Image: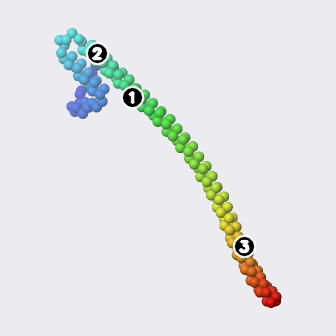
C-alpha cells in the first residue's frame, strides 16, 4: 500500500460540522492509541468502539431531527387547514355581501324610480291646484258681479 504525502498546508484540516469534528477526534484518539501500545486495548478495538459511539450519536441525532420535523410537519398541516377554512369563510362572506349589495342596489333603483313618479304626481297636483284656484277665483269674481247686478236689479 502506498500513501500519498500529506500537503504542507493545513487548510484541508478545517472541520465545520459536529459529525466531522467527532470523526476527527476519533481518528486523533486512534492515532494516540497507536503511539501508546502499552494498553490492553488494541487500536482496532478502540477505533471500532469510537465508530460505534459515533453511530449511536448519529442515530440519536436522526431521531431528534425526525421528531422536530414531525412537529413542524403537523404545524404546517394545521396551518394549511386553518387557512383553507378561513379562505372558504371569507369567500362565503364575500358572496353573501355581494348579493346583499346587489339587492340594495336594485332596491335603490326601484325607490329612485318611485320617488321620481311621486315628484311628477306632486308637480301635476300643484298645477291642478293652481288651475282649480284660478277657476274658483274667476267663478267667485263672476258670482260677486252677478250678485251685485242682481242686487241692483232688485233695488
* Residue 89 image point, x, y percent: 54, 41
Q: Residues within 10 Å of mark 1 (few under 14, many from 20)?
A: few
Residues at circles 2 and 1 in contact by the CB criterion of under 8 Å: no
Instruction: Say which of 107 and 131 sits in front.
Output: 131
Q: Report, in whole angstroms, how far the alpha carbon at label 3 lies from the one at label 1.
A: 88 Å
Give the residue displayed 47% in from the left and 33% down from the top.
78
* x then y, percent, for residue 73: 44, 31
Residue highlighted by disc 1: 68
Q: Could you say which quadrant of the image residue 55 lies in?
A: top left
What is the image's colouring?
rainbow
Front position in the image: 50 or 1: 50
**In this view of the protein, which residue sits in the foreground, 68 or 120?**
120
- For marks 2 and 1 on the same chain, the one whose residue lies earlier in the sequence: 2
The outermost residue toward the right is: 154
| Residue 44 visible (yes or no) | no
- State which tag comes first along the sequence, 3 or 2: 2
**Disc number lying in front (2 or 1):** 1
Task: Kindly identify the residue that appears in the image at 33 percent across and 19 percent down.
Answer: 56
Position of 10 compared to 144: left or right?
Answer: left
> Residue 85: percent from the left, percent from the top?
52, 38
Q: CA distance from mark 3 to mark 2?
A: 117 Å
Residue beneath label 3, please?
A: 128
Please indicate, yes or no, whether residue 77 appears anywhere in the rendered image: yes
Q: Quadrant of residue 123?
A: bottom right
Earlier residue among tags 3 and 1: 1
Task: Find numbered disc 2 in the image and state the secondary structure of the residue it sits on.
Answer: helix
Structural crowding at the residue carrying mark 3, measured as other residues with C-alpha within 10 Å and reported as few (<14), some (14–19) or many (≥20)? few
Quarter that holds the C terminus: bottom right
Q: Residues within 10 Å of mark 2 (few under 14, many from 20)?
A: few
The residue indicated by pointer 2 is 49
Amino acid at each position: 500500500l502506498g500513501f500519498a504525502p500529506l500537503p504542507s498546508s493545513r487548510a484541508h484540516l478545517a472541520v465545520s460540522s459536529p459529525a466531522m469534528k467527532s470523526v476527527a477526534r476519533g481518528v486523533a484518539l486512534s492515532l494516540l492509541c497507536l503511539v501508546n501500545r502499552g494498553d490492553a486495548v488494541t487500536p482496532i478495538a478502540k477505533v471500532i468502539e469510537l465508530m460505534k459511539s459515533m453511530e449511536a450519536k448519529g442515530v440519536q441525532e436522526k431521531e431528534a431531527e425526525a421528531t422536530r420535523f414531525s412537529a413542524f410537519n403537523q404545524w404546517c398541516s394545521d396551518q394549511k387547514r386553518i387557512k383553507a377554512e378561513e379562505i372558504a369563510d371569507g369567500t362565503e362572506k364575500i358572496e353573501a355581501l355581494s348579493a346583499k349589495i346587489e339587492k340594495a342596489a336594485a332596491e335603490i333603483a326601484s325607490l329612485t324610480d318611485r320617488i321620481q313618479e311621486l315628484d311628477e304626481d306632486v308637480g301635476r297636483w300643484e298645477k291642478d291646484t293652481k288651475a282649480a284656484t284660478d277657476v274658483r277665483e274667476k267663478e267667485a269674481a263672476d258670482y260677486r258681479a252677478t250678485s251685485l247686478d242682481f242686487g241692483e236689479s232688485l233695488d
